[in-house]
Amino acid sequence: QVQLEESGGGLVQAGGSLRLSCAASGGTFSRYAMGWFRQAPGTERAFVAVIHWSGTTIYANSVKGRFTISRDNSKNTGYLQMNDVKPEDTAVYYCAVGLVSSFVAGTRVADFGSWGQGTQVTVSS
C-alpha cells in the first residue's frame, strides 16, 4: 500500500500561483498513474489532472492551460503547478495513485486505490 502526503496548500489571491506536492512512500512510484482531485464543500470529489507512468497527461477542462501536472520518479514525488488561480479553484486537493492501464483515462475516483489526506487551497478574490 502506497502512502501519500500532500503539501503546499494555502491562501492565495486570484491570479496568483501555488504548487502542490505529493510525496509517495511504500511502493514503486514510477509504476503508478498519479492523479489530482479536488473537493469543495457540499460537492463530490472532482477530477483535476492525471499523469500516467508513461508521462501522458490529461486535464479537466476547467484547469486546462492554467494547471500543470508533473512527476519526479527519482524523488517519488508528484506536483501540481497552479497558475492564474480563480476563486472557483478553492477546495481541498487530494493526490492519488493507482495502477491505471494505458487504455484507461484515469479520470475517475475509482481508478485510484491510494489517497493522501488532502491539502486546503483557498483563493481570495
Image: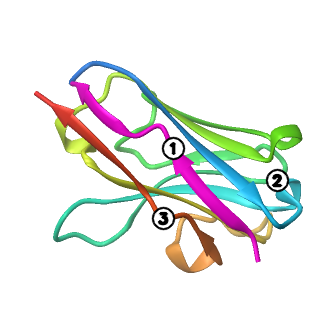
Element type where label 2 sits in the image: loop
Q: Is residue 12 magenta?
A: yes
89, above or below 19, in the image: below
Element type where label 3 sits in the image: loop
When asked about the image quadrant of residue 106, the answer is bottom right
Q: Main secondary structure of the magenta part?
A: strand
Label 3 to label 2: alpha-carbon separation: 22 Å
Q: Report which residue position mark 3 lands on.
A: 117
Foreground: disc 2 or disc 1 = 1
81, above or below 16, in the image: below
Q: Residues within 10 Å of mark 2 (few under 14, many from 20)?
A: many
When asked about the image quadrant of residue 25, the answer is bottom right
Residue 30: percent from left, percent from top: 87, 53
The earlier-in-sequence mark between 3 and 2 is 2
Q: Is residue 112 visible?
A: no
Residue 47: percent from left, percent from top: 45, 59
Residue 56: percent from left, percent from top: 74, 45
Q: Report which residue position mark 2 lands on.
A: 53
Q: Which residues are magenta?
A: 1-13
As shown in the figure, which amino acid type bears the numbered disc 2?
A: Trp
Residue 39: percent from left, percent from top: 32, 62
Kindly identify the residue that appears in the image at 79 percent across and 43 percent down: 55
Foreground: disc 3 or disc 2 = 3
Q: Are marks 2 and 1 in contact (CB under 8 Å)?
A: no
